[in-house]
Image (cartoon, rainbow, N blue to C red):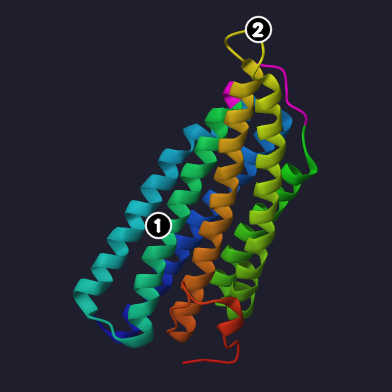
Amino acid sequence: MERLHFHQELEKLKITVLNMAAHCQDAYERATRAYKNRDTELAQEVIDGDKKINSIELEVDKQSLRLLALEQPMAKDLRMIIGNMKISNELERIADQAVNIAERTIFLCQHPPLEKTSAMESLIETSRQMLKQAIMSFRDMDVQTAREIRRMDDQADESTVQVLKSLIELIVADAPAIDSRRIKTRRSIQTIIISRCMERVADLSTNIGEQVIFIAEGLNIKHQELREEDPGSSQ
């Protein structure tokens, strides 16, 4: 494969991953909106749309393996292919979290709503923003934005802790309930799982940012503390 043609194919691969990213971001936006608005129809749309995302992931794998087999790329080109495959995998997991949220939203909509908390609102907004910035950092190969995503993850973690505390209090209060079904407890547990899905989206967005840094600079910072990072490093 000629070098010019190879780089054209590499650009096509990135476009395919960005297409997948757009679908995943839309799925997560819809899933969280369905949860906030108690919209079962929108939640079902998220579930039904997952097959499309899975098919794009298969196309990413196909394009990546073809480039690896035919060109035997080195250095940054190799990092680009590997990074695209890993980002695609993270995106597929984000889509799975969106489906999980949607499925549990449908259950919650069958029962009276629990009181919304500011911590849950913060978690939704932070995780959405992290995913948006992760995709932008990949699109633009923006290492600075990729590093900022890691710093936002602490905020998502703190919001998750606050959500868990408030919901556990509801579960404890519901323990003496005469109704053996303990509907409030069941709703609380489903909401806890939803919050953990949102936290997971934040973590997966952080992983995408780390892959951007790997592609751009050849650095693996996955297990590196933020204070140890050298924002001026490059390769």
Residue 190 picture location, percent across and down: 58, 30
- Label 2 – label 1 distance at C-alpha: 46 Å
User: Does 81 sit left or right of 177 as displayed?
Assistant: left
Secondary structure mainly formed by the magenta segment? loop
Q: Tell me what residue is drawn at x 40 percent, y 71 percent.
A: 83
- Most extreme residue toward the front is 176
Residue 99 picture location, percent across and down: 50, 37
Task: Examine the rendered structure and indicate whether residue 124 appears above or below residue 147.
Answer: above
Residue 110 visible to an observer of this rendering: no
Going by the numbered disc 2, the residue's amino acid type is Ile
Q: Tell me what residue is drawn at x 75 percent, y 49 percent.
A: 122
Q: Quadrant of residue 228?
A: bottom right
Residue 159 visible to an observer of this rendering: yes
Q: Tell me what residue is drawn at x 66 percent, y 53 percent.
A: 128
Residue 109 picture location, percent across and down: 65, 21
* Crowd band around label 1 with a 10 angstrom C-alpha radius: few (<14), some (14–19), many (20+): some
Between residue 76 and residue 4, name the one nearer to us: 76
User: Does 119 sit left or right of 137 as displayed?
Assistant: right
Task: Examine the rendered structure and indicate whether residue 183 appears above or below residue 49.
Answer: above
Q: Quadrant of residue 172?
A: top right
Going by the numbered disc 1, the residue's amino acid type is Asn
| Magenta-drawn stretch contains 108 | yes
SS label for mark 1: helix
Between residue 235 and residue 203, name the one nearer to us: 203
Q: Tell me what residue is drawn at x 37 percent, y 64 percent.
A: 85
Label 2 sits on residue = 178
Label 1 sits on residue = 89
| Magenta-drawn stretch contains 2 | no
Tag in front: 2 or 1: 2
The part of the chain drawn in magenta is 106-115
